[in-house]
Amino acid sequence: MNINAIREQFPILHQEINGHPLVYLDSAASSQKPRSVIDAVNRYYELDNANVHRGVHTLGSRATDAYEGAREKVAAFLNAGAPEQIIFTRGTTTALNLVASSYARSVCKEGDEIVITPMEHHSNLIPWQQAAKATGATLKYIPLQPDGTISLEDVEKTITPNTKVVSVTYVSNVLGLINPIKEITEIAHRNGAVMVVDGAQSTPHMKVDVQALDVDFYAFSGHKMCGPTGIGALYGKKALLNKMEPIEFGGEMIDFVDLYESTWKEIPYRFEGGTPIIAGAVGLGAAIDFLQEIGLDEIDQHEKRLAAYAYEKLSAMDDITIYGPKQNRVGLITFNLDDVHPHDVATVLDSKGIAIRAGHHCCQPLMRWLNVSATARASFYLYNTEDDIDRLADALLQTKEFFGHAIG
Ligand code: 7TS
């Protein structure tokens, strides 16, 4: 990977923030966009823009081809099998809500179980709370080990023949760990449950093959993988999608409408009511091209190298707590400096041009499990370097010194 050539393609990185060259370490919240993605969206609006799936005019067919072409790219990217198994959504949140509101509410009843973990992002937690409340099903949690990982023994104990849905994040946005999705899926299937995966933090960083994992549903967001905001997708197995009722009704998703009854189009269109996010899909397609050109394995290795370097550097500091396991870690590191509030850490770092995130990371139950109200988090992507991590470590030392003196 030629990191300088990659960085050249991200216009936003080449600026000063508060008098310092920007170090962007918040890609887990949203990644930056390469020129090719920005250009693809601009080109679409400048040359091809029209509504899709209607009209016979040339721009309409170009827009439709661009939108459906993006669906094919997503399907190939995830090895989905067929493009109609990809439903475009606003992102991971909307995709998970679709499964919880449509699939789960139609199959679950009292006595059934929905199984998740305490490390889930609120987007993969609240939809299941709501589905459990609406159906009378019980929400159960696979417990966490002291380092935040889950053990397959606990998975075996928690999932039972009463379990209808298991939903787990592939990668934790706080602990930086990778969950054993293939193994959990096997246990879920053995008990007759479907497996849902929150792929928000995995899809941007590693090769994902939904058929090899054998998961039933897989959700992700475009904006964390070099694509635009407002676009993401849900992958689903055909037999399940075909059984699911839409949760949004209106234009484009119908087959036949009468005064008192209507019927729906085939998948995926029945789940895409209204004018879709056409430019977003085009941008997502360009992002997939960009990532594939570099290679997901290359990106994965680069980030793992950065993660190991950051872990070593930060863990050598005094008065720092790093959360999550040391091994099997993706490119993010969540930490707290003792006696300094993470918001203060992030504010001092911003004054030095370094962007990190502080807060509960939409994981309040996990924060309570960690016994903290908030943490700081630095997250890396393909455009970050060891130099960025050196800048982070230096700035953290200065932060400690500053607050140490201020407190002392
Ligand atoms: N699931 C996980 C694991 C996430 O990390 C996020 C976003 C979502 C779901 C929701 O994605 P959205 O695109 O629908 O919003 N995570 C973060 C984060 O860690 N910091 O900001 C957003």
Image (cartoon, rainbow, N blue to C red):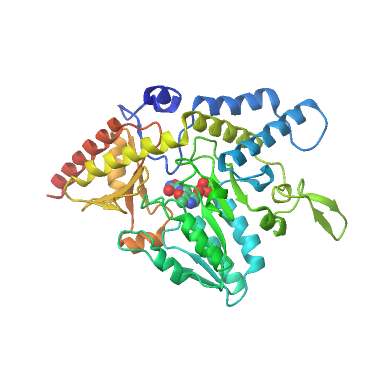
Residue 16, quarter of the rendered image: top left
Residue 23 in the image: state x and y as whole percent.
34, 32
The extreme bottom residue here reads 111
- Residue 199 location, x and y as percent? 50, 49
Give the left or right position of residue 264, taking residue 206 as reference: right
Q: Can residue 15 be seen in this view?
A: no
Q: In which quarter of the image is residue 117?
A: bottom left
| Number of dots carrying numbers | 0
Quadrant containing the N terminus is: top left
- Taking depth in this image into account, of 265 and 329 the one nearest to the observer is 329
Give coordinates of residue 322: x percent, y percent. Answer: 27, 51
- Please name the residue shown 47% across and 32% down the image: 295
Can you say whether 206 is above or below 352 in the image? below
Identify which residue is drawn at 65% across, 27% down.
Answer: 45
170 versus 50 height, above or below: below
Residue shown at 60%/49% (left/top)? 234
**132 or 343: nearer the eye?**
132
Where residue 64 appears, as percent x and y from the top left, is 73, 34
Image height check: is 85 above or below 18? Answer: below
Q: Is residue 99 above or below residue 158?
A: above
Residue 280: tell me if it is visible. yes
